[in-house]
Amino acid sequence: MSWRAGPDDEVKNTVRELLATNKALFLSTCANDRPWVAGVYFAESDAFHLTLIFETDGRSLANIRINPHIAVSVSTGSAFDLYLQGEGDAEVLAGGEHLDAARNAVRAKAPEIELLKFRAAAVRVTIRHWRATDVTLGWRPGKELRPPMKPSPN
């Protein structure tokens, strides 16, 4: 995805850099009024599309199958370090070719995933918006970043 120059370039670059320099995120799901947070490895194809790998028998994947609306956080866990929060939608990808592609993308970023031996499923996350928060830069409340608008067909 290409960016147009604009006033939010610093936020765009921050989001891209944090995604590129982190290999795991915190994922929040909820189904049947039971919220759940889990750490998960990811790979990004761009700032608004992430690929994740899940255990087929885990609670996160079960929740996504019921309710695809998710939230994510890319963070060290400290409120004084730059962090991202995002909302989006998750889609479980069917078919072995999707799982192979997802596993390869995540493995390239986080090779240690090979140590986790589990039956896996691939999930694609589309982020609807990010919020980047950095107390030291004065980004409080955080700076919002939304995907570029698609041109309307004429």
Image: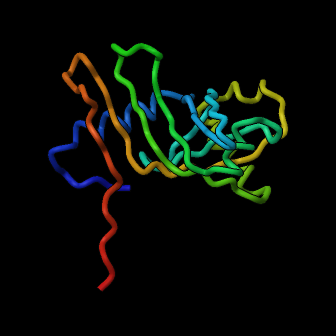
Looking at the rendered structure, the number of numbered marks drawn on it comes to 0
Seen from the viewer's position, the closer of residues 79 and 34 is 34
* Quadrant of the rendering where the N terminus is positioned: bottom left
Q: Residue furthest left?
A: 7
Residue at 46% over, 17% down: 76
Q: Quadrant of residue 141?
A: top left
Q: Residue furthest front?
A: 33
* Quadrant of the rendering where the C terminus is positioned: bottom left
Whether residue 125 sits left or right of residue 134 in the image: it is right
Can you give x and y, in whole percent of width and height, for residue 99 in the image?
74, 50
Q: Quadrant of residue 106?
A: top right
The image's colouring method is rainbow
Whether residue 67 sits left or right of residue 143 in the image: it is right
Q: From this view, report whether residue 32 is shown above or below residue 142.
A: below
Residue at 69% over, 37% down: 60
Residue at 71% over, 55% down: 98
Q: From this view, report whether residue 110 is shown above or below residue 70.
A: above
Q: Residue furthest bottom?
A: 154
Q: From this view, report whether residue 154 is shown above or below residue 62.
A: below
Can you give x and y, in whole percent of width and height, for residue 88 in the image?
49, 48
Residue at 18% over, 51% down: 5
Seen from the viewer's position, the closer of residues 143 and 115 is 143
Q: Quadrant of residue 9?
A: top left
Can you give x and y, in whole percent of width and height, for residue 72 in the image?
51, 35
Can you give x and y, in whole percent of width and height, for residue 111 in the image?
67, 28
